[in-house]
Image: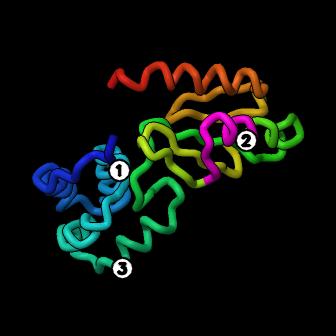
Amino acid sequence: MKPKEIDMVKLRGIIGEYKDVKWGLIPLLQAVQEEFGYVPPESIEPIAEALNIPPSEVQGVVTFYAGFSLKPKGKYVLRVCRGTACHVKGGQSILSSVKKHLHLEEGETSEDFQFSLETVACLGACFVAPAMMVNRTYFGKLSPDKVNNVIGQYEKTEGDG
């Protein structure tokens, strides 16, 4: 499985929706990433032209915010919390379990583009520490066994979608 092919017509359509929007850069980048799973490097120049800003400004925003990526990510992005509450409650064993199960290191994406592994400073879910997210879904009070069950749910759905 490959990352989604960049449909330049679709990209131009998304850009067109934000052409005259004041302060539209971040929402535009979010829309592009939502569509393609990342901000394709070839979208930087057309975005800059449409918003009448330098390409370096677009590039700077993309690289500054951790929520944006210039590389394709997996269908399922796992974010493991490294915050204090998660750390104290065994977060390192959660990260180790994810790495072992997926055979990935932090920042890597599986060859089939099904999974990406990231760590974050805090998920804001301290009350259910240790925690992680898969895309926009939170999972808390984790143990290594629970991690394997969560990942297993997403492995089962690989063909759906």
**Horizontal side, residue 28 vs residue 98: left or right:** left
Q: Report the quarter where the C terminus lies.
A: top left
> Which residue occupies 45% across, 56% down?
68
The answer to which quarter of the image holds residue 80 is top right
Q: Is residue 71 left or right of residue 148?
A: left
Above or below for 36 versus 19:
above
Chain part drawn in magenta: 96-106
CA separation, marks 2 and 1?
26 Å
Query: Mark 2 vs mark 3: which is more N-terminal?
Result: 3
Is 105 inside the magenta-drawn segment? Answer: yes
Can you identify the residue that label 2 sits on?
95
Amino acid found under the numbered disc labelled 3: Ser
Q: Answer with left or right where residue 64 lies relative to residue 88.
A: left
Residue holding disc 1: 33
Q: Quadrant of the N terminus?
A: top left
Magenta span main SS: helix
- Residue 86 seen in the figure: no
Q: Quadrant of residue 117?
A: top right
Which residue in the structure is indicated by mark 3? 56
Mark 2 or mark 3, whichever is nearer to me? 2
Where does the image place residue 144, in percent across and percent down from the top left?
77, 27
Closer to the N terminus: mark 2 or mark 1?
Answer: 1
60 or 154: nearer the viewer: 154
Label of residue 54 in the image: none
Of mark 3 and mark 1, the one earlier in the sequence is 1
Task: Quote the CA–CA distance across marks 3 and 1.
Answer: 18 Å
The residues bearing labels 2 and 3 have C-alpha atoms spaced at a distance of: 35 Å
Magenta stretch encompasses residue 72: no
- What's under tag 1, amino acid-wise? Gln
- Dot 2: within a 10 Å radius of its alpha carbon, few (fewer than 14), some, or many (20 or more) residues? many
For the residue marked with disc 2, what is the amino acid?
Leu
